[in-house]
Each structure stands twice: as structure tokens, then as C-alpha cells.
Amino acid sequence: MKIVHCIYGFNTGGAETMLIDIVNEQCKTADVILVVVNKSYDRSLLDKIDRSVRVVLLDRKPGGRSPFPILRFNILLARWRPDVIHCHQASLAPIIMPVWRNMVLTVHNVGIPPKWFHRYKRLFAISDAVCDEIIGHGYSNVTKVINGIDVDAIAMRGNELQHSPFRIVQVARLDKNQKGQDILIKAVASLKARGNDDIAVDFIGTGASLQELQTLAAKCGVESQIRFLGLRDRSYIYAHLKDYDLMCHPSRFEGFGLTVAEAVAARVPVAVSVGDGPFEIIGQGLFGRGFATEDAEACADAIAEIYDNYAATLQRVDAARRHVAENYSIRTTARAYLENYI
């Protein structure tokens, strides 16, 4: 089988991380090509792709109107004659000639406009939340293929009790409107007002909200408890998740939440907003703590409960890790795509 994966840019993000794992797994049994349309990519991420995967960089200027990169793309497709064209953004449809009937799309998040969904033979949803939303738009050609991770590559936390200060991590793009970093900062301020300043938070990631979040931390009087570590590659994250006592992911909306699954695999307790993908990963609260979306006080309550009952919390981490290993394996994800392409 010949598979062409298409994406506009290839920078740090959940979809790109997922795509690296998918192509590296699929290339073991298929001829795999990755096309990056725009001149917007991280070479260090591309270097993580298996050498048997052909990587084609069209180098179109983002937002540019030159027809030549798109023309080249379609000429290449005609030359390759792939069995399937797997797109990772819905808006790729209009730049691919409609003669191709074997296009599929992975919908990587909730809230994706359905404008181009009709151009795809099959839609793949990465979680129940995404699947339900696609069906709500009136599309029945949807198959759920859950995101996966390499569980065995992630270093595991031991059984030691919490550190002092209690160490919390969030790994996400600094986009407060989706990822909710401001909610976590306000929760830390609430805990401090309640008398618990034994809390330290590391935000791993970069993004447009950095300055605003730094200002908020200072305004709330918790700047000494908050660190912004910037971008870290996956090797660093997989090695260091075990250093934390809790992952807190207070996203306002989220299709899946790959880093939540990774934290569970590291035997780190997690607390997430209810609804959408992260809450699904923890079995609707069976394997972690949920709290009301957009509610900083509810987030603070969840952290306080875990902090005050940490020994009991640790008793659930092995069952949580087994749950992730059984349900969110990258091998299962890659195989499911192959089985559902045609």
C-alpha cells in the first residue's frame, strides 16, 4: 500500500507528534510519503522520521498565492498514484485536484469547521468527543481511531511521596484560550490564599500567551511559584515527567490530550477538565481527577484533594498506566488506520 500523508506545517504540536509516530509505524509494512506544504517546519522534528519515509517539502510561503507549489504537489500525486491520501487539516482538500477519490482526513481537535468534510471519503476522529461532534455535523462516514503513544519509552515515577514543593507540570502550547494555563495560575493563587504555598508549576511549551501568562502570575502574586521552561523535545519530556507529582491540564477544549496519556504512562497522577479528550483518557474520572471546565476554584479543589491524599492517589497510578497501555498504543493506532483506509 502506498500512503501519502499531507500537512501544511510541521512544528511542535500534538498532530505533528502523532504523525511522526504513525508514519514510523506504518512504514514497516507500507510505502509512506509525507508532504509538508508550507515552508514552516522544525528540522529537528523531521529528523525523527524513519529514513524509509520519503519527506517532500513543497516550501510554499505560508499564505502565499503562488500556484507553483500546489501544481508541483498534484503532479507528484499523479506520479505516485497513492492508494490513499491522508490529510491532517481539512482545508487541504481545495489544493488537491478532485480527481482523487481516495482522500481521508484525521480530525485532530474539537471545534474544526466542517466546511471541507464532504471532500473526504472517510473521516477519522481521535476521540469520542471528536467523533460525536462530526456526527453532530451530519456526517456518518466517520471512524474513531484513538491516538496512541509508545508507553514503554516513557520513564516511570517511583512510589515516593510528594516533593516539597509539590511539583505540577503542564505540557502544552502556550495558548490560554484553548489550553487554559491561566486557570492553573489562578488555582495556584487560590491555594496560596488558603494557606498552601507549597506548590510549584512548570509550564513546558511556547506560544503567543507567554507574556500574558507571566503578567497574570505576577498580578496574582505567584510568580515565584511558576516557571515557563519553554519548548522541550519529546526525549526530554519522556525522561522528566517522572520528576513531577501531578500533571494538571485545565484545557477549555481538547480533542485528545496526548500529554495526559504520556503522564499517566509515567505513573504521574493527573487532573483534567471534564469533557472532551483528556477526561476520556482518564476513564471519565476512574483513573484521574476531573474538575469543572473554566473553573479555577474547582481546579484548586482538585489539586488540594490530591495534595492532601497523595498516598491514596498513588494507589491508582498502576491501574491507570495499564488502562493507557491497553487502549492508547501507537501500534494499535497505526494498524487501525491501515485497516480502515480502503
Image (cartoon, helix red, strand yellow):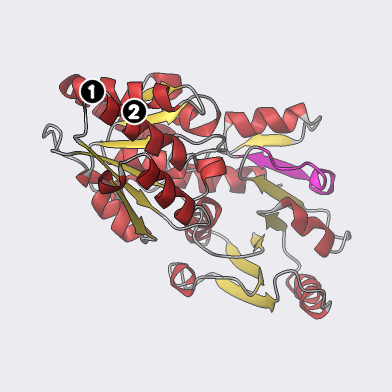
Which type of secondary structure does the marked residue at label 1 adopt? helix
- Could you tell me the amino acid type at mark 2? Ser
Q: In the drawing, does residue 270 fall left or right of residue 165?
A: right
Mark 1, residue position: 313
x and y percent of residue 342 in the render? 71, 47
Alpha carbons under labels 2 and 1: distance apart = 22 Å
Q: In this picture, which residue range is highlighted in magenta?
A: 111-125
Which type of secondary structure does the marked residue at label 2 adopt? helix
Crowding around mark 1 (Cα neighbors within 10 Å: few <14, some 14 to 19, many 20+) is some
x and y percent of residue 59 in the render? 67, 78
Q: Quadrant of the N terminus?
A: bottom right
Residue 249 visible at all: no
As for residue 123 lying within the magenta part, the answer is: yes
Mark 2, residue position: 190
Crowding around mark 2 (Cα neighbors within 10 Å: few <14, some 14 to 19, many 20+) is many
As for residue 289 lying within the magenta part, the answer is: no
Q: Earlier in the sequence, mark 2 or mark 1?
A: 2
x and y percent of residue 222 in the render? 30, 42
Residue at position x 54%, y 34% in the image:
252
- Which of the two discs, 2 and 1, sits closer to the camera? 2
Question: Number of callouts in the render?
Answer: 2
Residue at position x 82%, y 45% in the image:
115
Q: In the drawing, does residue 158 fall left or right of residue 14?
A: left
